[in-house]
């Protein structure tokens, strides 16, 4: 297959980033590692929203499952054998809860990080799409599910450490997480995960599977009349989004050394979507870059002018949608040679109801 | 991915940090609080209090002859942001100490960063104990410096049936766990325990449960604006301080103003500090703060702790003759001063030996001290009854 | 669990239902009839609260407790005006793109929250209920706070007003016509653009009035809107999008389920259980309690 210009740009960019530890200071490198970890989740949002047209406001749920799965393992490793994790002791829990037990094993944990969020996403998607729940309903339901999960995490303090989240890790697979060398290693692991997520997803979306997804996004009923089962495709896309969110959550937990309910809540899930929208919801690299740049800008602007930050953020939401519906990537792609599928079901007749509203 | 073009180099230019060299002769410290988001209500004024102390010290020639340069960062009420900004302060700005944090979750998020980089954090807020990092100076009340004295005071008043009400997060749950052990040990009755989600506004069920349980007193660990809803609905249900008093651990002068004194009149709060304390250091602090931030500005326990933290750090630096966090941590133990809170001393576990006051809420959001501990209370991060055998390393 | 407690919980159910209904009624217009996902709806409630505070500041010294009667029109007009501006500048450009509307209105909600912080400070403002609402009725051993009864009455009044407006007035007929078929209504001479503006502004105004009621029992601060928004959407979804009476039924249902769950388990657990229950309910009735039937293939 002849590599596309987009793939070449991605490759060049990844290469530049691979050498970042050589030319970046300690703090910028840490920061870059963190936002790269988040960008894996952004790739997932591109699949789910940009390609399959499903706006999930609950990606934090799957991000959290991945993060908590790993955090439980790290917490158990940091606890002397035979003891309970400290927060359980402080909450009067006397025996290790059953669902903690498997996470003592590193291979099982890694398996859980890869399967648990995807399985949860599959279940949620199956429940929604088999009843043909679409559009804004999906957004509201995913947000409600996330809220229920966060409320439970907060409330079940003896099992989850509540609002404080799980913290105070020591080692992972025998590696000391607090040594400076680990930061660098973790950075490269994260970058590899980003590369894998981008490459794998791009390859997958080029297959007929990806084309059916786009067809569903642009007109679900017509796709159904052509003999496809949209629910199956949407469930698959949602699972992929969940998988990527879970991996992202696990990486982010490693970077930050903690995971807590506030990190995965509504604000996180909405912000994720906005950076993807800014970068370009239909473009993999666009959304990943949107997230990375957005988060870095946030770090800068919120340091310089904390009060102004919410105005900037709010205005960004409005402007992206009004002026740049396809994000920066869409703007850059506005060249004659590269025709893009329209984002919203546009021009061709017969006019679907949604569009007729806009006329 | 075919639509991608080269808008990517920007990624790097933004990440290249401008590592500006610090001003000649100045020493940098970080102030890290939430200036935006839900916690901003409480934390902005705490950051102000720390800034006031720094300004005062600079006006008098600084520390070891060097002026203090403040690097102010916004934690944005978001715990990962606290961790990220702490990392920036320590590794990029190379600050000598950080004054900051409010919620337990923000402290827990920052803790690994401070331990990894060997920094020093001054944490000014009351908390649930059960933590003892060598890199954190916990100056707010430990449970035995706020919750337990409040319980003892309540029992001393003849209240025997106690209802525990809190927001659903770590501090209320842990404080209540400890309180329950002590209630049982004192042969008093626990008549109920309820938690409401952070920010919750609906208390009908809670009040109905209180009504059914008929307690003598409520020990309240609700956070922030949930208190406004609770007291409005408690009053609407026909309760008052006369019929069912409430002792609160998270309502200080500022919160009292926001709740409205009409709702709070006659209720109690327990803290290590009240704005009304008559000692000279406090008169000076209150006057200086109100001169800078407005005559009506309310001053609270965490603000007084934050203000004093800067002076503690200065004293420790001067004792160690060094800004090195490790040396400062070693030197700070045993330092004693007359602060706005009264006489305080730093204990070996990094917390304060300090007095405890119970105040009665009155006009203008002020509290009148009605009881105080006999002398000062030593900090105990691990409650002996609830967590036997646990001590600071 | 004695009778008094159960009776008390039943009243709690009614109270919670009235709050949910007040929070959701404005949405029934913008979301239910126009399919606009307005994430800034909670901020209209907030604006209503702040206007109540201002009414108490301005009119309190002369009118005393009568400030409340100034607060209602002020909150209605203020919020409606804000809603009209929002519709004219942003929403109008996004019809037919519900997901994008969701994002844009979320941005607007952030801006409004920060604006409230700038204007009134991040600490909330105190609003005190009039003294004639400070007592309570006692029926047997059950206490019924007057302010709660007032909020329930307010919810019923707003519900009744909206029902009349939509089902008995000429304006309502036009709204229903546009909702059924926009093209046909337009062809028959209905000015659909003006109508959109009016419906959205009305929804905002209703939220403002609701905000007055909420201010009497809950805080008024920059983040208070966020506390109501998710539940408000759930009420509309459970009730059936486009049905005002469905929304009312849903509010009552969710109110009693909440009261029951809170009464017999812990308050924090009940919250999570309620959310899961709503998701389960939508498995059973994806179009809500009172679905709007339509022959259109692609609706909402």
Image: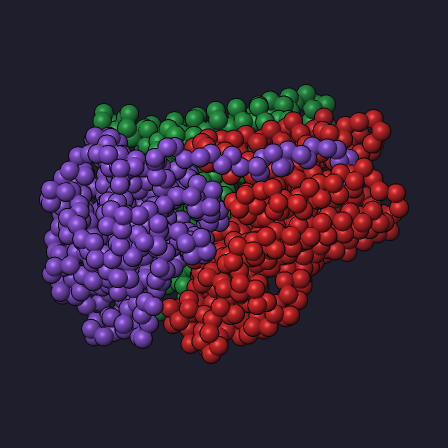
Give left or right: position of A16 versus B218.
right
Chain A: its colour in the image is red
Which picture quadrant has residue A104? bottom right
Residue at 41 percent of width and 60 percent of height: C267
User: Which residue: 80% across, 27% down?
Assistant: A335
Q: Quadrant of residue B167?
A: bottom left
> Residue B392 at x, y = what percent?
32, 67
Apparent side of residue A203 relative to residue A295 in the rendered image (left or right): right
Name the residue furthest bottom: A82
Q: Is residue A273 left or right of residue B363?
A: right
- Residue sticking out furthest to the right: A1
Residue sitting nearer the eye, A280 or B110: B110
Q: Is residue B383 above or below residue A28?
A: below
Q: Quadrant of residue C261?
A: bottom left
Counting from the top left corner in percent of width and height, residue A28 is at: 55, 42
The one nearer the camera, C154 or A306, is A306
Chain letter tied to green: C
Image coords of residue C51 (percent x, y): 37, 30
Seen at 60% across and 41% down, the residue is A23
Q: Is residue A13 visible?
A: yes
Q: Colour of chain B?
A: purple
Residue at the image point whose x is 34% and y is 35% from the top: B25
Q: Is residue C21 visible?
A: no
Residue B38 at x, y = what percent?
41, 43
């Amino acid at each position: 297959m002849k590599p596309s210009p987009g793939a070449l740009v991605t490759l060049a960019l990844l290469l530049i980033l691979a050498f970042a530890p050589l030319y970046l200071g300690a703090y910028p490198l840490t920061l870059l590692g963190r936002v790269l970890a988040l960008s894996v989740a952004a790739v997932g949002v591109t699949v789910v929203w940009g390609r399959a047209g499903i706006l999930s406001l609950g990606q934090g749920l799957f991000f959290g499952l991945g993060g908590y799965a790993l955090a439980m393992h790290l917490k158990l490793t940091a606890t002397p054998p035979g003891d309970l994790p400290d927060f359980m002791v402080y909450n009067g829990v006397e025996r290790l809860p059953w669902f903690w037990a498997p996470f003592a094993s590193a291979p099982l944990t890694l398996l859980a990080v890869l399967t648990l969020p995807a399985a949860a996403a599959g279940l949620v998607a199956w429940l929604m799409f088999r009843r043909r729940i679409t559009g804004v309903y999906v957004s509201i339901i995913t947000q409600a599910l996330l809220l229920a999960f966060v409320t439970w995490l907060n409330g079940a303090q003896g099992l989850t450490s509540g609002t404080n989240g799980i913290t105070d890790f020591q080692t992972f697979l025998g590696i000391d997480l607090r040594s400076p060398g680990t930061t660098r290693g973790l950075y490269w692991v994260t970058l590899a995960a980003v590369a894998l997520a981008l490459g794998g997803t791009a390859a997958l979306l080029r297959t007929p599977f990806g084309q059916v997804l786009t067809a569903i996004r642009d007109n679900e009923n017509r796709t159904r009349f052509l003999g496809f089962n949209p629910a199956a495709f949407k469930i698959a896309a949602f699972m992929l989004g969940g998988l990527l969110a879970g991996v992202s959550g696990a990486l982010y937990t490693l970077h930050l050394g903690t995971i807590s309910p506030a990190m995965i809540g509504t604000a996180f899930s909405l912000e994720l979507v906005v950076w993807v929208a800014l970068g370009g919801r239909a473009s993999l690299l666009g959304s990943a870059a949107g997230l990375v740049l957005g988060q870095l800008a946030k770090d800068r602007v919120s340091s310089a002018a904390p009060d102004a930050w919410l105005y900037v953020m709010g205005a960004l939401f409005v402007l992206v949608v009004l002026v740049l519906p396809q994000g920066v990537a869409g703007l850059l792609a506005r060249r004659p040679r590269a025709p893009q599928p329209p984002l919203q079901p546009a021009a061709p007749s017969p006019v679907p109801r949604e569009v007729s509203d806009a006329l | 991915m075919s639509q991608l073009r080269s808008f990517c180099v920007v990624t790097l230019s933004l990440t290249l940090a401008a590592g500006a060299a610090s001003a000649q002769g100045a020493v940098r410290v970080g102030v890290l609080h939430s200036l935006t988001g839900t916690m901003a209500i409480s934390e902005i004024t705490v950051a102000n209090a720390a800034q006031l102390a720094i300004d005062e010290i600079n006006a008098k020639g600084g520390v070891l002859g060097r002026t203090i340069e403040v690097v102010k960062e916004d934690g944005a009420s978001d715990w990962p942001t606290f961790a990220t900004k702490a990392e920036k302060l320590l590794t990029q700005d190379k600050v000598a100490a950080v004054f900051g944090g409010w919620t337990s979750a923000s402290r827990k998020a920052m803790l690994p960063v401070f331990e990894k980089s060997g920094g020093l954090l001054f944490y000014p807020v009351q908390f649930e104990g059960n933590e003892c990092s060598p890199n954190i100076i916990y100056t707010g009340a430990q449970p035995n410096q706020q919750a337990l004295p409040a319980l003892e005071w309540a029992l001393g008043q003849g209240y025997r049936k106690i209802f525990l009400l809190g927001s659903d997060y770590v501090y209320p749950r842990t404080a209540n766990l400890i309180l329950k052990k002590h209630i049982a040990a004192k042969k008093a009755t626990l008549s109920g325990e309820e938690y409401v989600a952070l920010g919750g506004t609906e208390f009908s069920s809670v009040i109905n449960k209180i009504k059914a349980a008929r307690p003598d007193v409520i020990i309240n660990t609700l956070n922030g604006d949930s208190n406004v809803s609770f007291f409005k609905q408690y009053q609407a249900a026909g309760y008052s301080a006369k019929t069912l008093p409430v002792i609160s651990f998270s309502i200080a002068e500022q919160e009292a103003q926001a709740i409205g004194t009409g709702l709070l009149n006659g209720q109690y709060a327990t803290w290590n500090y009240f704005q009304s304390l008559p000692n000279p250091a406090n008169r000076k602090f209150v006057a200086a703060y109100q001169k800078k931030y407005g005559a009506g500005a309310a001053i609270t326990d965490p603000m007084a702790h934050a203000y004093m933290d800067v002076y503690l750090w200065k004293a420790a630096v001067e004792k160690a003759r060094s800004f090195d966090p490790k040396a400062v941590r070693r030197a700070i133990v045993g330092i004693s001063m007359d602060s706005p809170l009264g006489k305080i001393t730093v204990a070996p576990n990094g917390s304060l030996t300090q007095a405890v006051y119970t105040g009665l809420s009155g006009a203008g959001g002020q509290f009148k001290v009605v009881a105080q501990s006999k002398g000062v209370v030593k900090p105990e991060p691990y409650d002996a009854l609830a967590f036997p055998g646990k001590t600071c390393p | 669990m004695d009778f008094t407690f159960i009776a008390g919980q039943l009243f709690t159910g009614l109270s919670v239902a009235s709050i949910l209904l007040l929070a959701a009624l404005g949405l029934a217009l913008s979301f239910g009839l126009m399919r606009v996902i307005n994430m800034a709806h909670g901020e209209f409630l907030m604006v209503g609260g702040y206007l109540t505070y201002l009414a108490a500041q301005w009119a309190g010294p002369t009118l005393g407790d009568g400030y409340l009667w100034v607060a209602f029109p002020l909150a209605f007009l203020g919020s409606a005006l804000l809603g009209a501006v929002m519709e004219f500048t942003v929403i109008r450009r996004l019809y037919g793109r519900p997901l994008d509307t969701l994002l844009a209105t979320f941005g607007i909600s952030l801006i409004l929250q920060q604006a409230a912080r700038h204007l009134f400070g991040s600490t909330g403002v105190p609003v005190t209920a009039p003294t004639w609402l400070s007592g309570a009725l006692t029926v047997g051993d059950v206490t019924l706070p007057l302010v709660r009864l007032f909020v329930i009455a307010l919810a019923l009044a707003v519900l009744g007003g909206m029902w009349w407006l939509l089902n008995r007035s000429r304006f309502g007929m036009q709204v229903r016509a546009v909702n059924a078929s926009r093209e046909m209504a337009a062809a028959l001479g209905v000015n659909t653009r003006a109508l959109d503006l009016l419906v959205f502004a009305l929804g905002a105004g209703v939220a403002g009035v609701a905000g007055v009621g909420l201010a009497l029992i809950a805080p008024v601060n920059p983040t208070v809107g966020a506390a109501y928004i998710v539940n408000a959407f759930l009420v509309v979804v459970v009730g059936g999008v486009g049905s005002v009476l469905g929304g009312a039924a849903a509010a009552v249902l969710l109110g009693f389920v909440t009261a029951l769950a809170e009464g017999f388990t812990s308050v924090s657990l009940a919250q999570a259980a309620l959310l899961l229950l709503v998701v389960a309910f939508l498995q059973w009735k994806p179009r809500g309690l009172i679905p709007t039937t339509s022959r259109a293939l692609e609706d909402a």
